[in-house]
Image (cartoon, grey):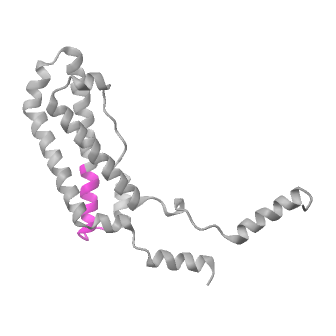
Amino acid sequence: MSITSSSQEFDRNTVSFGQKLAGSEAFKALFKEGMALVEASAAYLDGPGRVHAKSLPRLDALAYASESMRLTTRLMQLASWLLLQRAVNEGEMTQSQAAAEKNRVKLSRQDLATDRETFSRLPEQMRDLSLQSLRLQARVMHLDELLYRPKDLTVEPSRPAAIESQLDLLRSAFGGR
């Protein structure tokens, strides 16, 4: 069996950890957690958050506005990704269709909008929601990498013939020693 056919055999028989995880009870729990965080954030920002923002000093109110926009954007990205993956899990779309749709969902790492000192002066509930969303973001981005990382970036076993040809080039460059 050649290395190429061995590699193809490996690919056919390999179960992706990411795909297994994405279809598991753990994903369902992650989905529920993500959607609950979206709902809790919306309820806070539309209710008590408005009152809290109005009571802050001007610079902190600006930081609050920046942080709430960052939180909202982060959660919209995460919710879109979770909904796409749920559609794959439920057979509504294929993994490749989701990968194509995923290009429209710009899942990117977003840190806090403010420095730690300013962040510490924001209302506790806002800080808590922001930190929860960062933890969710890290978990979703890890799962995304497991599921959608291009296969050509995976490490393949080195081929003895390729190494031997490189050694031959070195020998000829240095006079056959």
> Residue 41's spot in the image, x, y percent?
15, 40
149 or 10: nearer the eye? 10
Q: Main secondary structure of the magenta part?
A: helix
Q: Is residue 23 left or right of residue 36?
A: right
Rendering quarter of residue 177? bottom right
Residue 89 drawn in magenta: yes
On the image, the x and y values in percent for residue 109 come to: 37, 42
Residue drawn at (38%, 59%) of the image = 100
Q: Position of residue 35 (x, y in %)?
A: 17, 51
Q: Is residue 70 above or below residue 11?
A: above
Corner quadrant of residue 70: top left
Residue 94 seen in render: no
Residue drawn 24% across the image and 50% down it = 79
Q: For this view, does 112 lie left or right of residue 168? A: left
Looking at the image, can residue 162 be seen? yes
How many marks the image carries: the answer is 0
Relative horizontal placement of residue 64, taking residue 50 as reference (left or right): right
Q: Nearer the viewer, residue 124 or 49?
A: 124
Quadrant of the snapshot with the N terminus: bottom right
Q: Is residue 148 magenta?
A: no
- From this view, report whether residue 79 is shown above or below residue 4: above
Q: With 106 as the anchor, is 34 left or right in this view?
A: left
Residue at 23% x, 42% y: name it.
Answer: 132
Q: Residue furthest top?
A: 58
**Vertical order, 37 against 126 (above or below):** below
* Residue drawn at (72%, 71%) of the image: 161
| Residue 146, horizontal then vertical, whole percent | 40, 59
Stretch of the chain drawn in magenta: 79-94
